[in-house]
Amino acid sequence: MSQEIKFADLGLAEPLLRAIADAGYTTPTPVQAQAIPQVLKGGDLLAGAQTGTGKTAGFTLPILQLLSEKPVAAKPGRPRCLILVPTRELAAQVEESVQTYGKYVPHSSMVMFGGVGINPQITRLRKPLDILVATPGRLLDHVGQKTLDLSAIEILVLDEADRMLDMGFFDDIATVARQCPAERQTLLFSATYPEGIAKLAAQFMRQPQMVKVEAQHAEAQIEQRWYEVTESERLFAVGRLLEHFRPVNALAFCNTKAQCKRLVELLQGQGFSALALYGELEQRERDQVLVRFSNRSCTVLVATDVAARGLDIPSLSAVINVDVTPDPEVHIHRIGRTGRAGETGQVLNLASLDEMGAVGRIEQLQGRESEWQPLAGLKPAAGGRLLPPMATLHLQGGRKEKIRAGDVLGALTADLGYRREQIGKIDVNEFSTYVAVERGIAKEAAQRLNGGRVKGKSVKVRLLDD
Ligand code: AMP
């Protein structure tokens, strides 16, 4: 593009531009440049964009502006905007984005998903609400119980619509759309365009504007390397890749749960910080794994494709394809998780002779040949044992105990004297709180916090270590 588009050219108001500047974004991504003016015009939008393209800001920014321009008071249990997403992780991230981009715009928002108690959600719904971010199942539970009413919806967003269809949510989406007023704006975001999307668009959208972001844009920022391995070399090769490239955080995909388990055991045995994410984990375990990986206190997350759905780690240094996926679209989806908004991502692929057919299909879809490297070229880089920069402290007590991130930060900095930079992400869940701290101070901080107080109450603290 010869002429660079600026956020200020897109029609966004000053409080939103200020929040964008705070977030550190200098230029809009292609999907933002196209979607924001369209949404502001008030019409329906069908956008082909996958995670990592900046699509979340592409719809949250103009939505916040549209809602704030109309002097309608938010009402209890009757949100003005509904953002429907496939998974709880995505729901939490989207709502976080609403708060980030809406920090200078008065609004109220709520996130709603299943697998957690319904009563706190019912309580929250009794207060005024502008923007609701929800997964379909729990949303319909509330509609059924009449604790939620969709008759005031002005804007309906279907985010990652293809994923929702993959998960069998077509009928649920249709039910939700029918509950919303016909006079509304509908925005649909989808990485792919299967038949179901056309059906949704035909039934529930009115002359949508189409926006498509070319996959090449993200691909150009991804470096892919391929290594040929035998079956007996495969899992050991992962450790060699880690020692050679030393990523801060890497997502390793296996085709089966059994392979995930084998790999994690091997990596942990070799002294790497590795965790596994697969279907049968309990919700609590899954939360903990995700928190530790996203706060940079775990180097490798080993996952199946299904388990990794909806996962969004903004800056991922590498994706390792331990097994080649037979479905080339899945490969594109896997690698799209690195090389986000301006950063270069690294994709490391292991393939055996038996998998060359699948490699060929991937080459065909990407329109380019694979670049093969010799396994023997992998040499451990300097720096000793590869450890993540942070470690996680687990505090017993969370939202139920009215703990807030600021309380924990205060206890660590004001009370115990640690520097702000030594403390990382703080996640307050319902019953527990996770704090990332610099690895070097983790043991001591856990001990000192254990004897100390948070919000006037003594707390139980444990260092989560492998
Ligand atoms: P998304 O595709 O919405 O999941 O966004 C992917 C990542 O890109 C998120 O971590 C955003 O914070 C980041 N991002 C979004 N818009 C921009 C931008 N204009 N410049 C730089 N980073 C951005």
Image (cartoon, grey):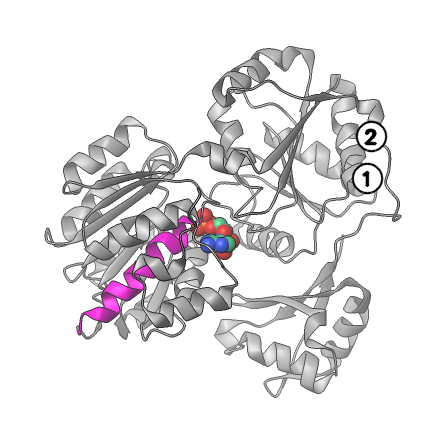
457 to the left or right of 202: right
Q: Could you say which quadrant of the image residue 444 lies in?
A: bottom right
| 2 and 1 marks in contact (CB < 8 Å) | yes
Which residue shows up at 65% across the image and 11% down it? 354
Q: Is residue 77 above or below residue 194?
A: below
209 to the left or right of 358: left
Mark 2 CB in 8 Å range of ligand 1? no
Q: Residues within 10 Å of mark 1 (few under 14, many from 20)?
A: many
Quarter holding the N terminus? Answer: top left
Identify residue type, mark 1: Glu
Residue 69: within the magenta? Answer: yes
Q: Earlier in the sequence, mark 2 or mark 1?
A: 1
Name the mark on residue 378: 2
Which residue shows up at 77% across the image and 34% down it? 241
Question: Which stretch is magenta?
Answer: 54-71
Task: Tell me residue 38's x, y (percent).
Answer: 25, 50
Q: Is residue 433 visible?
A: yes
Identify residue type, mark 2: Leu
Name the mark on residue 243: 1
Which residue shows up at 33% across the image and 47% down it? 34
Residue 205: within the magenta? Answer: no
